Image (spheres, rainbow, N blue to C red):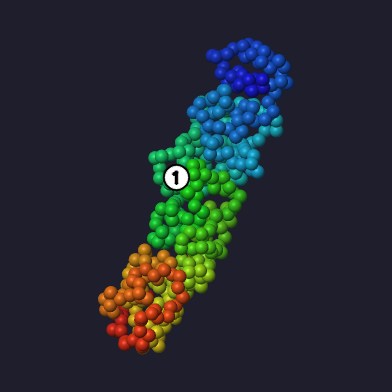
């Protein structure tokens, strides 16, 4: 009986004289409910659902109406938290023909409002607007309320959808540097952040609902890393307006000398987010004798050390990866958890290392000579090509 009453209650409130006269409404209510107490509204869903559900029109039978509540039904301990956006009434008898908002949505650091208002007159055919300065949209102007939700918008790529709130990837120099290795696409974000795009439906955008209550989410669980940490301050709201933050990554494969598959050693130079890391081999794992900081791991000392009988350059054994000036020549052959061996023609382009040519998995310690390979002292290789480029 109460449900029937509520449906008639909505019809009387919204259908107007064109559909039901005030007298007919009153007669129907008394006939169905018997007394006012029998039809008393005792929760929010009595009128408009909790949380409200979107519809293309005001449906007086279900309580659904136009808007974007489907993607804004934030939960706190399993209960819809309408107070994020709306000024909450103290009783269920709160109809004042207005839609009331808090002065600053989601306690954003800037004054964040819908249509720059804190209240507007309710209507069955609303004129939709946008929110501005809200932290859950990275302080960018939002799509229009009532528009097709991003997760249902088949006309946009996931990268375009992510860019609705924040650049994807952000347009600062450090993100651009990482994009050179992993691509200028959202799939590259998972190298340092959770993979939101892999979540189904609107789950891909649900991380926005915790904005203002957490810091920037950083993790290093995707290949080539298996963990690590970043020392910079990524707390809220700093990450919203200070992309030039400081901090260094530690215990990562991608910023290590590349000599281990796990428990990585620190790089030759600390990769501070606000600093400038060199583009040569020296940044992470040193170089040849000419670099002033020759590598010493494995047999490198016998090949590029200052006391080596015949010093050779990095390019002569790693020609597919570096140039003769110790610059990275092919990014796909770098930071891939492999030791990419490619001999220059000067020393034998058909040569192999340990019986394998090309990619060698980075799972080995400095090896001993394989069976069948001579351990005799080799003759001196041809003199290395000297770099004319200052590193």
Looking at the rendered image, the quarter that the N terminus falls into is top right
Q: Position of residue 209 (x, y in %)?
A: 57, 45
Q: Of residues 318 and 176, which is closer to you in this image?
A: 318
Q: Is residue 71 left or right of residue 88?
A: left
Point 51% across, 59% down: residue:
221
Residue at (58% x, 39% y) in the render: 73
Residue occupying the far left of the picture: 345
- Where residue 275 appears, as percent x and y from the top left, is 48, 67
Q: Disc 1 on helix, strand or loop?
A: helix
Q: Determine the residue positioned at 52% across, 44% down.
A: 203
Observer able to see residue 181:
yes
Residue 291 pos. (x, y %): 39, 79
Q: Is residue 9 visible?
A: no
Residue nearest the viewer, comparing 132 with 124: 124
Q: Quadrant of residue 312?
A: bottom left
Whether 228 is drawn above or below 161: the answer is below
**Quadrant (top left, top right, bottom left, bottom right) of the C terminus:** bottom left
Q: Is residue 1 above or below residue 174?
A: above
Q: Quadrant of residue 29?
A: top right
Judging by the rendered image, the residue that carries numbered circle 1 is 161
Position above or below: 25 against 90: above
In this orientation, which residue lies closer to the viewer: 69 or 273? 69
Q: Residues within 10 Å of mark 1 (few under 14, many from 20)?
A: some
| Above or below 152: residue 20 | above
Image location (x, y in percent) of residue 230: 54, 63
């Amino acid at each position: 009986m109460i449900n029937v009453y509520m449906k008639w209650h909505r019809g009387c409130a919204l259908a107007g004289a064109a559909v039901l006269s005030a007298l007919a409404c009153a007669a129907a209510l008394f006939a169905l409910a018997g007394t006012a107490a029998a039809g008393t509204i005792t929760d929010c869903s009595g009128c408009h659902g909790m949380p409200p559900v979107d519809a293309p029109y005001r449906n007086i039978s279900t309580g659904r109406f136009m808007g974007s509540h489907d993607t804004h039904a934030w939960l706190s301990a399993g209960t819809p938290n309408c107070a994020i956006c709306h000024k909450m009434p103290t009783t269920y008898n709160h109809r004042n023909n207005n839609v009331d908002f808090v002065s600053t949505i989601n306690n954003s650091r800037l004054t964040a409002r819908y249509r720059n208002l804190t209240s507007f007159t309710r209507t069955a055919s609303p004129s939709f607007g946008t929110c501005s300065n809200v932290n859950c949209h990275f302080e960018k102007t939002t799509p229009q309320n009532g528009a097709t939700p991003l997760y249902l918008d088949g006309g946009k790529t996931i990268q375009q959808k992510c860019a609705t709130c924040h650049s994807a990837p952000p347009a600062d120099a450090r993100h651009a540097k990482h994009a050179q290795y992993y691509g200028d696409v959202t799939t590259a974000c998972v190298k340092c952040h959770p993979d939101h795009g892999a979540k189904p439906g609107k789950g891909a955008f649900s991380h926005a609902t915790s904005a203002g209550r957490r810091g920037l989410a950083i993790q290093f669980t995707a290949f080539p890393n298996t963990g690590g940490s970043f020392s910079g301050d990524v707390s809220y709201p700093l990450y919203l307006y200070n992309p030039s933050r400081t901090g260094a990554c530690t215990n990562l494969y991608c910023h290590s000398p590349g000599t281990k598959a796990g428990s990585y050693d620190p790089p030759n130079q600390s990769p501070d987010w606000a600093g400038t890391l060199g583009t040569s081999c020296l940044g992470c794992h040193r170089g040849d004798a000419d670099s002033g900081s020759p590598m010493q791991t494995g047999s490198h000392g016998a090949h590029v050390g200052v006391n080596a009988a015949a010093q050779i350059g990095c390019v002569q054994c790693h020609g597919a990866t570096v140039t003769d000036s110790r610059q990275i020549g092919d990014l796909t052959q770098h930071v891939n958890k492999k030791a990419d061996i490619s001999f220059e023609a000067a020393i034998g382009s058909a040569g192999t290392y340990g019986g394998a040519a090309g990619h060698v998995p980075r799972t080995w310690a400095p090896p001993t000579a394989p069976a069948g390979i001579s351990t005799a002292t080799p003759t001196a290789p041809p003199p290395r090509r000297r770099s004319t480029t200052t590193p």
